[in-house]
Image: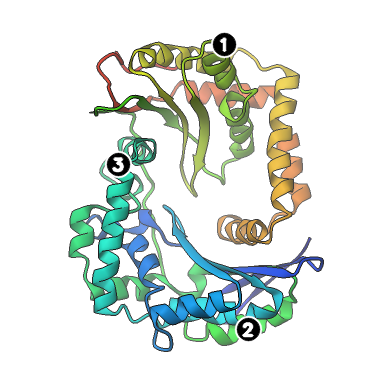
Amino acid sequence: MEVQVTTLANGLRVVTDRMPNVETASVGAWVDVGTRDEKAEINGISHMLEHMAFKGTERRSAYDIAEEIEAVGGHLNAYTSRENTAYYAKILKQDLPLAVDMIADILQNSTMDPEELERERTVILQEIHQAHDTPDDIIFDYFQEVAYPDQAMGRPILGSVELVQSMQRGTILDYMRSNYSGSQMVFAAAGNLDHDHVTRLAEAAFAKLPKQTEVTRPLPTYSGGDFREERDLEQVHLMLGVNGVSYLDDDFYTASVLSTLFGGGMSSRLFQEIREKRGLAYSIYSFLSSYSDSGLFGIYAGTGAKEAAEILPLISAEMSKLADGIAADEIARARAQLKASILMSLESTSSRCEQMARQIAMYGRPMTVEETVERIDAVNESGLKKVAQQLLEGDVTLCAVGPCAHLGEKPKFS
């Protein structure tokens, strides 16, 4: 890896990773603003802005944006999360200047055309309806809301039908001007490229970015709860979870290994006990959602109405066993899974581009592969037992969608 970082006069951080043996490049801008930065009355605006950025600039129509990138065989996309909004492209190496210019254009010169806004409003409403019609999707929103009630961290990324219908063009433009600044943004590029060349391109293309924007984030307050939505479905979709760790926490890698060995693969405890030994669910896994100052440790299961009541105490029992001790071969297997995932991702320019941007945004610097592997290898049984005990002591959040009549009471992990 040949990673270099340059900070421009307007605060924009440019980070590159040279991969001389490929013919492509991936580039993107990661903005340090997302759903958790929204006030209640404009929930969903980060996602709406992400959509509208592609709908025309002072120099390009919405069609021009699509046509120009596809004319060179590239693709342009974006996503919104709770803490970031990302705009990225993958192109052949010779088309790097075009990709940089297009991303800079949509982030500085979007016109938010009123007609395009009305069309895209309908598209986003369909996206919201689709999410609500997909129980194994919408349950994650419910879980987030119950875990973080009445606060930005718990609100849905897509917003609500009512808020999307009422969102005004001026509100979106004001939000963009207030939050899209050089110091709030990382521009990352990976592939067959030169750092100095990318830096010059970015410096020229992003010259209109304001230098600084103050973004204050109140600390989220976790609250365990119980939410059930009765639906006429074949399966109950369950989520259980507790307060987790942030990605800045000293125990982040320990919690990551713990989640992997508990429910991260076919050899994991949950998969073996619930699916392989008992045949109670097709899909069951655990996950760690970490943010800059908080996090969630969760478990998802999709199962039948009768099986759901049996699964809940089994999950609780398996959680309790984590604090009893973990075998050395189990730890080694989980560490190997994490390391393999990281190392395999290094073969992709897109993955390396996103990884660098996220590291700059999270830690203020890129992390070497060796440093990451060293942190994973440092995870041991005593650390895992400590983190497991902390998770067991937390209040449980339960969410269920489907035929919930047989679920019974919310379980406790301790």
Foreground label between 2 and 3: 3
Q: Residue at x 60, y 59 (%)?
A: 354
In the picture provided, is 320 more to the left or to the right than 17?
Answer: left
Q: Residue at x 22, y 66 (%)?
A: 167
Mark carried by residue 277? 1
Q: Are marks 2 and 3 in contact (CB under 8 Å)?
A: no
Q: Residue 414, can we see it?
A: no
Q: What element carries label 2?
A: helix
In the picture provided, is 312 more to the left or to the right than 226?
Answer: right
- Above or below, 381 relative to 88: above
In the rendered structure, which amino acid carries the disc numbered 2?
Leu
Q: Which of 274 and 314 is in front in this view?
A: 274
- Above or below, 403 relative to 337: above
In the rendered structure, which amino acid carries the disc numbered 1?
Lys
Q: Position of residue 346 (x, y in %)?
A: 72, 53
Report, in whole angstroms, how far the alpha carbon at label 1 lies from the one at label 3: 31 Å
Mark carried by residue 133? 3
Mark carried by residue 313? none
Q: Position of residue 316 (x, y in %)?
A: 45, 15
Q: In which quarter of the image is the N terminus?
A: bottom right
In the rendered structure, which amino acid carries the disc numbered 3?
Asp
Q: Quadrant location of residue 348?
A: bottom right
Q: Residue 68, can we see it?
A: yes
Mark carried by residue 201? 2
At label 1, counting other C-alpha atoms closer than 10 Å, the crowd grade (few under 14, some 14-19, many 20 or more) is few
Report, in whole angstroms, how far the alpha carbon at label 2 lies from the one at label 1: 57 Å
User: Most extreme residue toward the right, as rendered?
Assistant: 21
Q: Which residue is drawn at 74% across and 47% down?
A: 343
Q: Quadrant of the C terminus?
A: top left
Q: Residue at x 39, y 36 (%)?
A: 136
